[in-house]
Image (cartoon, rainbow, N blue to C red):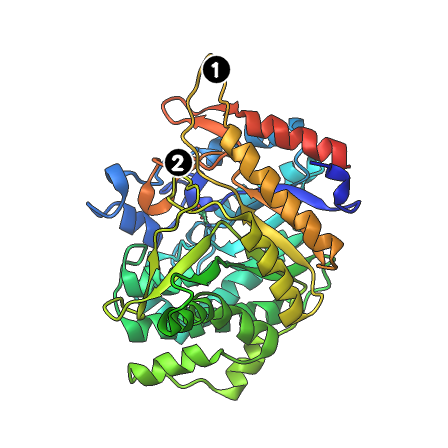
Amino acid sequence: MNSNLFPQGFVWGTATAAYQTEGAWDRDGKGISIWDTFSHTPGKVENGDTGDVACNFYNLYKEDIKLMKSLGYKAFRMSISWPRVFPEGIGEVNKKGIKFYRKVLKELKDNDIITTVTLYHWDLPQALQDKGGWESRKTAEAFSEYADLCFKEFGDLVDYWITFNEPFVTAFPGYLFGNMAPGIKDMNAALLTVHNLNLAHGLAVKKFRKYDFNSKIGTANCRSWAVPDNLQSPSDIYAARYADEMYYFSFMDPVMLGQYPSSYYETICRFKLNIVISKEDLEIISQKIDFIGLNYYTRMLIRYDKKAPLGFSEAKGPLEKTEMDNEVYPDGLYYILKDLNKRYGSVPIYITENGRATTDKVVDSKIDDLDRIKYLKQHFEVSAKAIKEGVNLKGYFVWSFMDNFEWAHGYTKRFGLVYVDYKNQKRIPKASAYWYSKFIRESS
Ligand code: IFM
């Protein structure tokens, strides 16, 4: 494809997250997170895998950044582990944690790599979970203190801040389906979590605005293009809209429009939940943000299913699947970009995650991940088309820089541009890593 279809200054980067890559789960004063607890609980993660060592980024960050630089990747998105800087979630600060992140960010800056920091990529301090987790408003308040500490300690080194990554995963798989940490199955808790996560986001943005930084702040949600499984079925049509509203718009509408979508209130009524949303909270949540982060992977075929917790389930589609069993559907990204542009105006959008898992085989020290190259190419193409049609898309972060701990799937799924041999922590750039490198070079 023609790399000149993207404007000058377009931000080309890669993304990772703390729990998935850092390791050093109990080193240098770090507190325990809900993912440490979850992964150490037998039966929760495939093969009993944990993030104890992960990619050992904690010790290998210099080599990883050097590799990133040599590949010409312009930006890096990483997350901060809340319990590494606040072992108990609030109160005493772990100076060694602060020192670690300053070293990483400084190394990125010294290599002219644009820094993007996610404050919450799912690893809540266990100490806060023990006090009620995201069901408690106090956790939202603690988050704003944690965010404030990060702004103060790292603000001079960060270009883009992202408050939350995919909050729907915390609320639904985390608090309703129970297949992700903290592994709870409770409708009231899930819908309260939605609100407290939104509130935490708004409180953090308010803190951010007190500083005179040159940096920008936004939030990153994942949206799959929701399609009714049976286009002739009114209940599937209803369910698809409902799924989109619950998973995506329950987070983005309060931020961008200062109101929840009707499905959120409908659910509170349907399940007779004990949740009241105040006007004051909506004002806090709807602080102006500088950009929308969009994570896109696939479409979801939705059908009405009265036995499922929320009344819908996902059907298996006919298209090519990735190793995550996701359909490859680049057009969904195009539709979403156009739709967001229409719904929220021309606010800058960054694709904060996009990529696919492949079955990678090392042959003669090489990995020919042609499916990943094809996938990225197709998604870049539709992005270029959206830009041409007026969408204010400013950057793209491929998920992921390297293979890493894929949550409940453990190490069985590989999303990296760079292969990680977990036996010896050797990194091998895959064919896609070189392809992306060339693409960036030609478009700059
Ligand atoms: O690995 C995850 C990431 O942590 C959040 N977004 C989706 C990725 C792939 O499943």
Q: Can the viewer see residue 296 in this picture? A: yes
Spatial CA distance of label 1 from label 2 is 21 Å
Q: Position of residue 35 (x, y in %)?
A: 34, 50
Q: Is residue 6 above or below residue 162?
A: above
Instruction: Identify the disc placed on residue 176.
Output: none
Q: Which residue is mark 2?
A: 54
Instruction: Identify the disc placed on residue 365.
Output: 1
Q: Position of residue 320 (x, y in %)?
A: 43, 41
In the displayed structure image, the side of residue 188 where residue 279 appears, left or right: right
Q: Residue at x 66, y 65 (%)?
A: 341
In the displayed structure image, the side of residue 422 where residue 219 appears, left or right: right
Q: Position of residue 136 (x, y in %)?
A: 36, 73
As shown in the figure, which amino acid type bears the numbered disc 2? Ala
As shown in the figure, which amino acid type bears the numbered disc 1? Ser
In the displayed structure image, the side of residue 345 where residue 153 appears, left or right: left
In primary-sequence order, the first of circles 1 and 2 is: 2
Q: Residue furthest left?
A: 42
Q: Nearer the viewer, mark 1 or mark 2?
A: 1
Where does the C terminus fall, quadrant-wise? Answer: top right
Q: Nearer the viewer, residue 424 or 241?
A: 241
Q: Nearer the viewer, residue 20 or 37?
A: 20
Q: Residues within 10 Å of mark 2 (few under 14, many from 20)?
A: many
Q: Residue furthest right?
A: 8
Where does the N terminus fall, quadrant-wise? Answer: top right
- Helix, strand or loop for disc 2: loop
Q: Can the viewer see residue 105 in this picture? A: no
Q: Are marks 1 and 2 in contact (CB under 8 Å)?
A: no
Report the label total: 2
